[in-house]
């Protein structure tokens, strides 16, 4: 990949932790040094928090990078990537921080390493504000596997916020050649499904979630399975509601949190799936965001989605700063948008 | 950012919880390691060996939620965790052995765990700067908080009060007020004087020891002593009265009795018991101005009274107690007095712990404007009569007042007198240029008028003893000669001015020689008067 600038300047207040993680991924695969200023500038507590610091350090380790400003509370970071090293890695995240976000940050880099890698990440596997393990396994990976990626993930132990202790493992093979993405149709419906993961909490919580979700989605309650995750160190609860089609799978998630009622957790998750099902676009809001980088690395592609979030907008802008690609969004029909990625060099 | 090292006790009840539910509970030692914005690199955990098992569980949980934290357990057996002496001693020993590296690490003391006695000991050790740390206070999340977690909340408290903007501003304002107060609200500009007042403020509030104020007559010693009293009364818990005495007015038996009191009939005229001024100043403050004038007997009594807080009234065999604070004033060099045997060196040693030299007005010419306003205001208040000075008059007065011509030999007394005269004579309460012109003349005349009272130069050149041997007749002439000498560059130059008339009639001029001989009559050389 060609170098665009000696140091790429990124204004951190345009986004939050995701902007930082995407920048780390992009820097690793492109070899491009970046300086991010005003990191998480618009958040109540700006600067790097521990979970971000963990990501920065993991990225630095994988990419043999030199880093300035990797300190708690730091609002400026310079990241100079070196050569990506495949291999066996073990990362532990404090306070049950999300393992899937660390995986997402490192995966593109390790796909571009010369050797195969295994990742063992300890922390939370079902966190608020992060994709749960099942989303990675059933929604994200199958799509990029169709683009030539050979990676699998396993959940060794559930981990929830606060206690953590969950373990996610990933086997990553270097990619031979990226295939361009084309995901514009859902294909035939296969199934809808629901599951409550429940650990060390009163059963009543799970039951209330099931009742609420079933009523919003007009499902039978027994369609939602209750699965105990009692090997988890601490208490926790996650509601996963999904729909599988021939070409794609979507999962909408609710994570129980202190101070949030079981009903509101379930309503949020159910409404998420309901929104997806009322459109015909194959790619949901979260998946859309996650597919941008693989599509750019494949130097082109297209997918249809039902809505473009601010996250996705920010992410497209960021990717265009690192890679010679151009994203365009066009409305195909009411409630369906096509996101197209083209190589600006015309390849 | 430096890595954070935290000290804390294992909370034998707050940190106690078992089973998976423990993660839903706020446990101070575990929870403080779970904050997204606080990274504790090392935890020095003080553990009573009785609770070692529980501690190991806590350490394992910390390893899970905070892999970045290294926990070091310290055996910390206490027979009675509520025994202040034992806990303080044990913590003191621990802290003394600990190798602090404040330039490399940030230290926190976790205050939430341990007995209240332990908290007090932590606090005291921190306050006394045995531990270069800030205090970490943790607590469970408030129930109504939106993103409540079992990590709860924390605050870091720095006992260095100067680091808190609001507090620092308040202290600065408070100090400003105090300084202003000591200066009687006069906005002085003299750097030396302002510095002096700042030092006096610190001593006045923080010390009960005697203060010695030196400086020429009229420099404001008495006013300053009064202000220090007011300040101590307001800020340092002084409850008694302010007693002011000029020692020059005390003579003989009267001196003893005035200061220390007497029993009825102890001397002729002692018709009733008298408590004495020192007794009157009990729990208060006595200002002894011109302390150099005090007789040796009184000095001895005063020294005892200062050291023991007791003294014997005249004619009494029963000691009287008085807890008084002392400010002494002098315009003399007490060291010279000691050398001459007129002042006890042990008393001087006792009173000159804090010595402040008040400069005369002539050395603070930049402050004359502010003091002029102050005096005008004071006159207006005292006489209930508004007095103003027009701009030209004010400028004319200040021009003279700041010039070397103005000697201000009686310092603020001169200024006060000048303002009083001008204000009294001012037509319709307006001081005009004419008023100033005539006042300037009066001042010049008063500084030249040396009959009996000498202005500044002579005592400086001659010792007190020498001066006593000169007839008033000669004093006037000598002072004029010395003044001319001081204004002249060379002996010949001074001679030319002094013998200006007679030299014109001479064929051979020998002014320098004539002046030299004149000075020699008083044992003076050119270098002495230059």
Image (spheres, coloured by chain):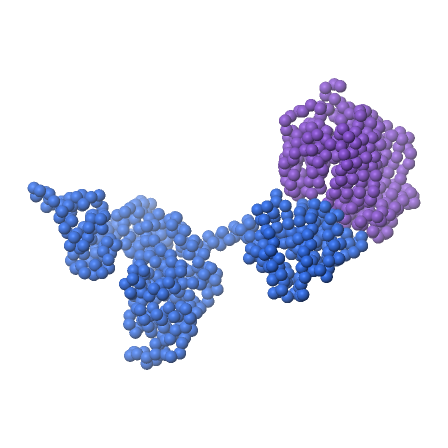
Chain colours: A purple, B blue
In this picture, residue B253 sits left or right of residue B243: left
**Picture layout, residue B128 above or below residue B365:** below
Q: In front here: B4 or B101?
A: B101
User: Taking the image as drawn, is residue A31 in sight?
Assistant: yes
- Above or below residue A170? Residue B60 is below
Identify which residue, A233 or B105, lies in the foreground.
B105
Farthest-out residue, top: A346
Give left or right: position of A252 versus B298: right
Which quadrant of the figure has residue B290?
Answer: bottom left
- Quadrant occupied by the N terminus of chain B: top right
Q: Position of residue B429 (x, y in %)?
A: 32, 52
State the residue at coordinates (75%, 45%): A96
Extreme residue toward the front, this view: B97
Residue at point 34%, 64% (across, down): B345
Between residues A92 and A38, which one lies in front from this camera angle? A92
Total number of numbered discs in the rendering: 0
| Residue A334 visible within the image | no
Point 67% across, 40% down: residue: A48
Give percent across and percent down for residue A152. 83, 34
Residue A191 in picture, x, y percent from top left: 91, 36
Residue ID at (33%, 57%): B215
Q: Is residue B32 left or right of residue A291?
A: left
Task: State the image coordinates of residue A167 (x, y, percent, origin top left).
Answer: 80, 42
Picture quadrant of residue A197: top right
Q: Is residue B466 left or right of residue A136?
A: left
């Amino acid at each position: 990949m060609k170098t665009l600038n000696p140091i790429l300047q990124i204004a951190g207040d345009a986004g939050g932790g995701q902007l930082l993680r995407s920048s780390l991924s992009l820097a690793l695969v492109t070899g491009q040094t970046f300086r991010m200023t005003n990191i998480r500038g618009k958040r109540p507590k700006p600067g790097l928090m521990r979970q971000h610091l963990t990501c920065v350090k993991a990225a630095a380790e994988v990419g043999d990078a030199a880093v300035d400003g990797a300190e708690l509370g730091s609002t400026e970071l310079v990241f100079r990537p070196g050569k990506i090293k495949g291999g066996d890695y073990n990362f532990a995240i404090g306070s049950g921080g999300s393992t899937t976000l660390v995986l997402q940050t490192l995966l593109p880099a390790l796909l571009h390493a010369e050797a195969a890698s295994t990742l063992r990440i300890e922390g939370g596997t079902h966190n608020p504000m992060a994709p749960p393990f099942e989303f990675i396994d059933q929604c994200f990976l199958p799509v990029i596997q169709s683009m030539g990626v050979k990676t699998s993930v396993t959940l060794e132990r559930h981990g929830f916020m606060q206690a953590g202790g969950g373990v996610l493992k990933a086997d990553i093979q270097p990619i031979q050649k990226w295939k361009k993405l084309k995901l514009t149709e859902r294909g035939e419906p296969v199934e809808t499904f629901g599951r409550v993961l429940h650990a060390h909490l009163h059963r009543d919580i799970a039951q209330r979630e099931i009742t609420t979700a079933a009523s919003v989605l007009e499902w039978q309650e027994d369609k939602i399975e209750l699965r105990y995750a009692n090997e988890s160190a601490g208490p926790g609860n996650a509601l996963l509601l999904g729909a599988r089609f021939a070409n794609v799978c979507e999962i909408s998630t609710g994570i129980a949190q202190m101070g949030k009622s079981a009903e509101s957790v379930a309503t949020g998750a159910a409404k998420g799936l309901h929104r997806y099902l009322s459109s015909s676009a194959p790619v949901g809001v979260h998946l859309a965001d996650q597919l941008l980088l693989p599509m750019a690395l494949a130097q082109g592609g297209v997918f249809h989605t039902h809505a473009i979030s601010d996250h996705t907008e920010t992410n497209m802008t960021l990717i265009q700063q690192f890679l010679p690609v151009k994203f365009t969004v066009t409305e195909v029909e009411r409630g369906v948008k096509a996101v197209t990625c083209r190589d600006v060099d015309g390849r | 950012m430096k890595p954070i090292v935290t000290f804390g006790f294992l909370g034998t009840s707050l940190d106690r919880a078992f089973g998976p539910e423990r993660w839903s509970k706020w446990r101070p030692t575990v929870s403080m390691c779970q904050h997204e914005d606080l990274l504790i690199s090392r935890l020095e955990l003080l553990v009573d060996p009785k609770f070692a098992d529980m501690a190991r569980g806590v350490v394992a949980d910390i390893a899970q939620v905070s892999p970045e934290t290294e926990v070091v357990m310290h055996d910390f057996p206490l027979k009675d965790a509520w025994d202040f002496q034992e806990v303080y001693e044990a913590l003191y020993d621990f802290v003394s052995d600990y190798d602090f590296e404040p330039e490399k690490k940030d230290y926190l003391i976790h205050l939430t765990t341990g007995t209240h006695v332990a908290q007090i000991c932590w606090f005291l050790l921190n306050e006394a700067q045995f531990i270069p740390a800030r205090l970490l206070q943790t607590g469970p999340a408030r129930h109504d908080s939106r993103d409540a977690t079992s990590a709860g909340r924390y605050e870091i408290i720095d006992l260095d009060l100067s680091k808190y903007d609001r507090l620092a501003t308040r202290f600065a304002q408070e100090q400003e007020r105090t300084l202003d107060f000591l200066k009687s609200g006069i906005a002085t500009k003299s750097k030396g004087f302002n510095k002096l007042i700042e030092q006096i403020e610190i001593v006045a509030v923080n010390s009960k020891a005697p203060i010695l104020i030196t400086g020429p007559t009229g420099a404001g010693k008495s006013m300053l002593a009064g202000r220090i009293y007011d300040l101590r009364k307001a800020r340092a818990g002084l409850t008694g009265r302010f007693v002011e005495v000029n020692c020059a007015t005390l003579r003989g038996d009267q001196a003893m009795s005035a200061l220390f009191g007497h029993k009825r009939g102890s001397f002729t005229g002692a018709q009733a018991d008298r408590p004495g001024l020192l007794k009157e100043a009990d729990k208060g403050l006595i200002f002894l101005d011109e302390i150099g004038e005090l007789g040796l007997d009184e000095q001895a009594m005063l020294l005892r009274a200062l050291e023991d807080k007791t003294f014997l009234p005249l004619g009494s065999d029963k000691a009287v107690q008085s807890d008084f604070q002392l400010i002494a004033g002098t315009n003399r060099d007490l060291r010279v007095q000691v050398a001459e045997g007129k002042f006890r060196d042990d008393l001087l040693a006792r009173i000159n712990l804090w010595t402040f030299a008040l400069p005369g007005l002539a050395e603070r010419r930049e402050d004359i404007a502010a003091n002029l306003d102050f005096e005008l205001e004071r006159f207006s208040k005292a006489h209930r009569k508004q007095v103003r000075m027009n701009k030209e008059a004010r400028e004319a007065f200040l021009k003279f007042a700041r010039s070397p011509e103005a000697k201000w030999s009686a310092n603020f007394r001169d200024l006060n007198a000048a303002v009083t005269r001008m204000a009294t004579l001012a037509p319709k309460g307006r001081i005009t240029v004419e008023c100033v012109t005539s006042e300037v003349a009066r001042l010049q005349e008063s500084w030249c008028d040396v009959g009996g009272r000498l202005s500044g130069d002579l005592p400086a050149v001659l010792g007190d003893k020498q001066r006593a041997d000169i007839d008033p007749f000669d004093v006037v002439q000598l002072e004029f000669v010395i003044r001319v000498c001081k204004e002249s560059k060379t002996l010949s130059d001074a001679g030319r001015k002094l013998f200006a008339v007679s030299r014109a009639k001479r064929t051979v001029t020998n002014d320098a020689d004539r002046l030299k001989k004149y000075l020699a009559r008083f044992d003076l050389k050119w270098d002495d008067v230059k």
